[in-house]
Each structure stands twice: as C-alpha cells, then as structure tokens.
Image (cartoon, helix red, strand yellow):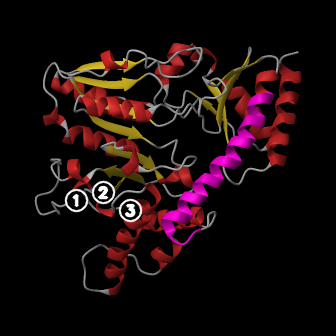
Amino acid sequence: MVDYITGGMANLHGTFPTSVVTDELLEKARRAVADWLHCRPEEVAFGQNMTSLAFSLARSLAGYLQPGDEVVVTELDHRANVDPWLTLAQDRGAVVRFIPVNPDTLMLEVGELDQLINAKTKLVAVGISSNVTGTVNPVGRLIARAKEVGALVVLDAVHAAPHLPLDFEALGADVLLCSAYKFFGPHVGIAVVAAALFERLPVYKLAPAPAEIPYKLETGTQNHEALAGLLGALAFLEGLGSGPTRPARLRAAMQAIEAQEQAQAQRLEDFLRALPHVQLYRAPAGTPKTPTLAFTIAGVHARDAATWFTQHHRMCIADGHFYASTLADKLGVNPQGGWIRIGLSPYNTDEEIEQFQQALQEFIHAHCA
C-alpha cells in the first residue's frame, strides 16, 4: 500500500505510467482473488465493504421479486446477510422466512427444509459459518434445495474465508461475499457473482461507466491502495502453502491453517467446557466449526470482562452481539452485554493459549468466588 501511494497513485484508463500501473493493479487483485476462491476473474467485484455490496446487489435484484414471492434467511447469521434481503422483501411485498437455529445445538434446523425453501422461494441467503459460534452451516444441502426450486443463493463468507478452503465453482452459489480485513488485508469488500447472473444483473450506475462485468458493479473510483493491500494479504496466505501454482499454494495454505486452528480450538473448547461459571456457546462434537468461541461468565458483563483482559493481559478479546442480533435475542445474552468472543488465527501460539487459560482462571477467581 505504501509503495503504491508513494509511487504516485492515479486513476484508471490513462496513458501515463501511474495510471497504467493502477489498471494492472486491479486486474492482478481480481486474478489473485479468483485463484484463492476458485472463480473467474471477471466474476470478482470490489466495493466499500461486504455490507455495502450486499445492499447494492439487493437493489439490483429488485425486479427479480414480485409480491408473494419468498426470501429465506437464517437466525444464525450476521445481519449483513439478513437486512439487505429483508429490506428488498419489504420493498417488493415479498414474504420472509427464517431458518431457525436450535438454541441447544446452535445449528440450523433444516429438518423441514422442503417447506422453508419451496416453489415460491426466489432467494436464499445464508452464512457459510457463524461469526459467533463458529458453526459451519450445511450450505451444500441448502444450495442444492434452492437450485431445485430455481432460487438464487447468496453466501456470506466473511467469517469463513480466513479459516476454511473455499471453492465458489464447486459450491454452486450465485453470490459469495467476503471482506479482506478478515484475512489480514485492508478494509475492502469482495463480491463474487456467478457470470450467468452477473451478465444479466441490472445495476445502478452512471451512464458513461462500464456496463460489462465485473466493472458495472464497481461504482465510482475504487480504493486502489486497499487493493494493493489485498494483494499483499493474499501473498502472505500463499506463502503459508506449497505447490506448483498459486491456486495450489493458496489451497494448501488454507488447509494448513484449518488444521492448526482446529487443533488449538479443540484445546480451548475442552478448557472452557470444564470451567465453572462459564457457559460456552458451541455446537456439539462432530459438527464442523471455525476456531471462534463465544462464552458468557455468570454475573459478569461482557464489556467488563473484555476490558479486564485488555488492561491486565493486553489481550484483544471482543464483546457484544457481533451483529448476530437475532441469535443474541433468542439466546437472551444481551442483558449482560452479549458474548465474550475469542478467535484464533495462524499466528496464534500454544503459549498464547496457555496465557489466556491462566488469565481466565484468574478472572473467575477474582470475580466469581
């Protein structure tokens, strides 16, 4: 990012060197994302953030919905993959159905999937994994059912992308959304839109702006320096893997990340389940999960605990509802400030896990005796 800015950043489509470099930068970023997510470069569009891209896509899909049509979302998701579609349904007179979450297993209840996703369903929006509980949803089953009835599928991969190998082509969804800041990059959003949909997707744009994919979704001047940073983040991930090609190295890197994080997360899960005064919100053994663990401490406000960890141990531990507000309401955690949430990344060490375990025991001894 610094090299790009100090080297003389410029806007697109000029004849001068800095503009040519910028044109090349954007295409390099598209190709890198395509290699990482196994999609076509022309299916990759950039934007301010995932939420803005989701609202933009919802607006573009307005003509796809008619009064009485149905939209399916979930109780487990971050609201960024719920509210754009609720707004769309409200504007178009469509019906919204929620796939419920089981409060005991913290998994989506898909036993009556054929009734939830039916002939009236036009769009299904679901997260690949929960940003609170880490639960990995059965997206393959949901996508297959949606395609049986001709519905579009929008996947929120913001939380999944840093932890799991993803293959857009194999998934068979219509849209996948993620954010670079979740995998060590800058704050920039990414939308992967299947070409078959993207080509016919009407978008709100300036008349002289490009009308072809993927550019037609990218309104105004993009955050070019952030895309330079996106390239850096993907280069970092690539360096964690090995193989003859960039796609192979990126996939190997994500597999290695998943293996390390799963082992460390299991250690943390076993520890948290055994602690008195702690309630862990985690799906049962055998359920695929990311290394994100949310818990509460009896009689303790989540913000007070997070503040204590910062002040006493310089630990970056988050608190709140994390925009999974439907789940927070259903589980009744808001009166105590939501959850305390910890998550693992490739750089986390076993020593840091031990430090957290000792710190949490210290906190409980001091505040829950």
> Which residue type carries mark 3?
Asn
The answer to whether the residues at label 2 and label 1 have Cβ atoms under 8 Å apart is yes
Residue 112 percent across, percent down from the top left? 38, 15
Q: Which residues are magenta?
A: 243-271
| Residue occupied by mark 1 | 213
Residue 318 percent across, percent down from the top left? 64, 36
Crowd tier of the residue under label 1, counting other residues whose Cα lies within 10 Å: few below 14, some 14–19, many 20 or above: some
> Which residue type carries mark 2?
Glu
| Residue occupied by mark 2 | 43
Q: Give the residue drawn at x 53%, y 34%.
A: 136
Direction from residue 192 to residue 255 in the image, left or right? right
Q: Mostly what secondary structure, the magenta segment?
A: helix
Could you say which is closer to the camera, residue 41 or residue 279?
41
| Residue occupied by mark 3 | 223
The answer to whether the residues at label 2 and label 3 have Cβ atoms under 8 Å apart is no
Vertical arrangement, residue 149 with respect to residue 244, above or below? above
Direction from residue 124 to residue 279 in the image, left or right? right
